[in-house]
Image (tube, rainbow, N blue to C red):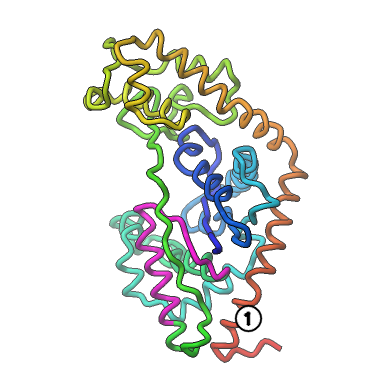
Amino acid sequence: MRVVSGIQPTGNLHLGNYLGAIRNWVAMQDSLEEGSEALFFLADLHAISQPHDPATLYRGTLEMVAALVACGIDPDRSVLFNQAQVPQHAELQWLLNGTARMGWLNRMTQWKDKAGKNREGQSVALFTYPVLQAADVLLYQATHVPVGEDQKQHLELARDIAQKFNNDFASEDAPVFTLPEPIIPAEAARIMSLRDGSAKMSKSDPSDMSRINLSDDADTMAQKIKKAKTDPEPLPSEAAGLAERPEARNLVGIFAALSGTSVDTVLTQYGGQGFGVFKPALADLLVTKLGPIRDRFVALQSDREALDAILARGAAKARLRGAPTLDAAYTALGLVRH
């Protein structure tokens, strides 16, 4: 079993990033049996498909490495790297561009959403980045790829490209590419803003009080929870009572996600009590769970040499694992490389 997954290297990581995505990667790594392997990459090549600031991308890449390691990704157990140091990703994308079809890419929902009405003004990279996503997983003969609802279509495209390439250029008993299967992760926690329970927690929110940053110290975390928007009613005794109370639902959901329990279990303990009791308990839990992650994250962020070394080692492993597949693709296409 070989699991492959990528994440765009955005900076200013917060509680929503941790509970919504990063924690699932750590659980995946820790659950793999002996002989299986996970490759996790920072999708910096994908990041340039849309307008970006180079300095921000560079900082975000290093920050994401620090965050992943601080949260539990072990570079000795998983292969952790960034795409830009593994040129086989871009090479294989070009080879697969001969197999991918315009009609397939035109049907991609995310292309339609991101391009909007100005399709002619978008970069070619934005249109073809699903082919790069296919290369990302096919290069390593991935057997399984974790996908959320918004990425299912892209994995289906990767399978279509792999199947057509195998049919066109390989024999049935010696295919070039493995067709990856989806892993549907357990439903990720959906963490909302501390100032508006109807909006997702986001680094782009102008108010820093709307989010718990991974870099926040214990006092800052506690202060943000103390000032988080709530309502005057006590907590209900069951989840149905939170239906029309978005801020209360968000705080209870954060408690449940951090403690590894259900919302109903939290309400069994705190139902009937006010936020004067619940908020301090949530702040204590948050500091207990995130405190050690925060300390390691801050320490790693300041150690540029260690971060560069992690990425370099991971990229070397990734290049080694990807080389046989790339060679097989070149050979299948009749391209002379000697």
Q: Which residue lies furthest to the front in this view?
A: 34
The residue shown at (62%, 45%) is: 73
* Residue count near mark 1 (Cα–Cα under 10 Å), binned few <14, some 14–19, many ≥20: some
Q: Name the residue under label 1.
A: 327
Q: Which residue corresponds to the image point at 63% horizontal and 45% vertical from the top-left?
A: 65
Measuring 51% from the left and 16% from the top, which residue is drawn there?
Answer: 222
Residue 121: x and y in percent read 38, 60
Rendered residue at 52%/51% (across/down): 7
How far from the left and from the top, in percent, is residue 98? 46, 81
Q: In this view, does 138 lie to the left or right of 276?
A: right
Q: Which of 104 and 139 is in front in this view?
A: 139
Q: Residue 257: percent from the left, percent from the top?
A: 43, 32
Position of 110 relative to 61 (above/below): below
Which of 300 and 252 lies nearest the eye of the viewer? 252
Q: In this view, does 224 lie to the left or right of 316?
A: left
Q: In terms of secondary structure, where does tag 1 sit? A: helix
Main SS, magenta residues: helix
Name the quarter where the N terminus is drawn. bottom right
Q: What stretch is highlighted in magenta?
A: 140-164
User: In terms of image quadrants, where is residue 266?
Assistant: top left
Above or below — where is 86 with respect to 205?
A: below
The amino acid at mark 1 is Asp
Of residues 252 and 225, the one drawn nearer to the viewer in this rendering: 252
Q: Is the residue 189 above or below the residue 246 in the image?
A: below
Is residue 220 shown in magenta? no
Residue 70, position in %: x, y? 64, 38
Is 174 placed left or right of 312 in the picture? left
